[in-house]
Amino acid sequence: MANSVPIRSAAASALALAALALPGCAARDPHNAVARAEVGAVAGATLGAGLGAAIAINPALGAAIGVGAGALGGAIAGVMMSEPPIVYGPVPPRDTAVAPGFYDTWPPGYSTPPIGSRVPPPPRPG
């Protein structure tokens, strides 16, 4: 009887790792609430079965109850965490400049170069 505890914890660990891997197989569109509910139900059912089997006195009964409760909770969490749909609409132009006068002035101590001035040539090497 003393040896059954490590086996139960190993089985629960294996089910918990499966709970992390299974939603990757079901993931599709993150904006679709139904797809998020499916992924949440798969993750919740697997995690619920693992926790139910590890914690309950009767592992089979605990896993059976954990599957149902985990699937329901995971589906609800998946729907609640789904992102709103993307709306691609026209963007109206602004009436004013975003940073008015930003390019109109020079820093203090500098002035605009005279009209018609040229940049001096680089110094000759040597």
Image (tube, grey):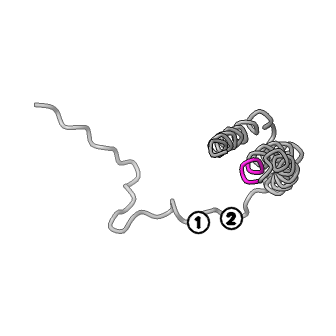
> Measuring 32% from the left and 67% from the top, which residue is drawn there?
109
Q: Where is 78 relative to 21, above or below?
A: below
Instruction: Give the residue type that dot 1 points to.
Output: Pro
Q: Is residue 52 in the magenta section?
A: yes
Between 86 and 19, the residue placed more toward the observer is: 19
**Which part of the image, by quadrant, shows the N terminus?**
top right
> Measuring 80% from the left and 35% from the top, which residue is drawn there?
26
Under circle 1, the secondary element is: loop
Q: Is residue 54 in the magenta section?
A: yes
Under circle 2, the secondary element is: loop
- Which residue corresponds to mark 2? 96
Residue 90, disc? none
Principal SS element in the magenta part?
helix
- Res. 92 image quadrant: bottom right
> Outermost residue toward the top?
126
Residue density around tag 2, few if under 14, some if 14–19, many if 20 or more, within 10 Å? few
Q: In the image, which residues are magenta? A: 51-56
Residue 33: where, in percent of width, then height? 87, 48
Between 39 and 35, the residue placed more toward the observer is: 39
Examine the rendering and report whether any part of residue 9 can be seen.
Answer: yes
Residue density around tag 1, few if under 14, some if 14–19, many if 20 or more, within 10 Å? few
Query: Mark 2–mark 1 contact, CB under 8 Å?
Result: yes
- Which residue corresponds to mark 1? 100
Left or right of 125, for residue 17: right
> Measuring 51% from the left and 59% from the top, which residue is drawn there?
103
Residue 27: where, in percent of width, then height? 78, 37
